[in-house]
Image (cartoon, helix red, strand yellow):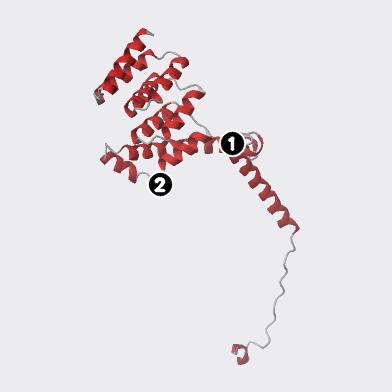
């Protein structure tokens, strides 16, 4: 606890004098990460650093949590959602990075990732980001698109596996890949109902019968060419 307070004192002094450099950000993030050994300490970092008014301090907090590899707890998810809406592009990038390394997933997180990704296109924008290393918003959007695509691919694989195993629409009965009562589950059940109704209508519909139309004239009668 004493070491933590000393680090906070040093950090606040540097922020107050506007002398917090990039190298010091990295150093302080590493020192804070070394002290994180429990979820309670992650919550303290979130309260003291991640939600700080200074963007450099917020980034130190995110980097410390990422280096600690402690990604549990509802407090972290809510903090990431706030930082995914941050005005600073690099803070959005770091929040996406934590979600990626922690393999976090939720409906709210996916919605936030979609907003961060925007209209980014891969691989064109990934190449553009590599050529522009200082463009924080672009790097955040590209990483968000990578993470979102990975989550969608994971859900699709689980969905296909459930279909192969049970022969039924997974989201309509057991909550896979959608949670019970979620929008995705409701839409899946609705699609299944529509398919059943369409099949029922097809079976009960009147079948059309066509009779052969006999020609009016003989084959050697030229009148058959007249309109």
Which residue position holds label 2? 119
**Residue 26 visible in the snapshot:** yes
Q: Secondary structure at mark 2?
A: loop
Across and down, in percent, residue 226 comes to 60, 90
Picture residue at 41% right of the left edge, 26% below the top? 51
The quadrant where residue 180 appears: top right
Residue 103 visible in this rendered orientation of the protein: no
Number of the front mark, 1 or 2: 2
* Residue 43 x/y as whole percent: 45, 19
Q: Residue furthest bottom?
A: 222
Q: Is residue 210 left or right of residue 142?
A: right
Tell me the SS state at disc 1: loop
- How packed mark 1 is, by other alpha carbons closer than 10 Å (few <14, some 14-19, many 20 or more), is many
Disc number placed over residue 200 in the picture, else none: none
Nearer to us in this view, 57 or 109: 57
Q: Give the Cα separation between the discs numbered 1 and 2.
A: 25 Å
Residue 28 horizontal/vertical position (percent): 30, 18
Q: Is residue 48 left or right of residue 165?
A: left
At which x and y percent is residue 85?
42, 36
Instruction: Read off the residue under disc 1.
Output: 178
């Amino acid at each position: 606890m004493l070491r933590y307070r000393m680090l906070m004192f040093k950090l606040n002094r540097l922020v107050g004098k506007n002398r917090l450099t990039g190298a010091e950000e990295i150093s302080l993030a590493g020192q804070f990460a070394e002290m994180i050994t429990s979820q309670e300490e992650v919550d303290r970092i979130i309260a003291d650093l991640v939600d700080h008014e200074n963007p450099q301090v917020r980034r130190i907090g995110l980097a410390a949590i990422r280096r600690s590899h402690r990604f549990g707890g509802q407090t972290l998810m809510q903090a990431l959602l706030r930082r995914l809406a941050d005005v600073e592009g690099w803070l959005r990038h770091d929040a996406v990075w934590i979600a990626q390394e922690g393999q976090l997933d939720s409906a709210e997180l996916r919605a936030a990732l979609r907003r961060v990704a925007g209209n980014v296109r891969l691989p064109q924008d990934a190449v553009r980001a590599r050529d522009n290393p200082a463009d924080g918003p672009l790097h955040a959007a590209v990483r968000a698109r990578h993470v979102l695509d990975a989550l969608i691919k994971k859900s699709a694989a689980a969905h296909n596996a459930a279909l192969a195993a049970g022969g039924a629409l997974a989201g309509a009965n057991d909550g896979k890949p959608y949670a019970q009562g979620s929008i995705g589950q409701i839409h899946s059940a609705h699609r299944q109902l529509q398919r059943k109704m369409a099949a029922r209508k097809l079976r009960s519909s009147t079948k059309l019968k066509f009779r052969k139309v006999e020609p009016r004239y003989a084959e050697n009668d030229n009148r058959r060419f007249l309109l």
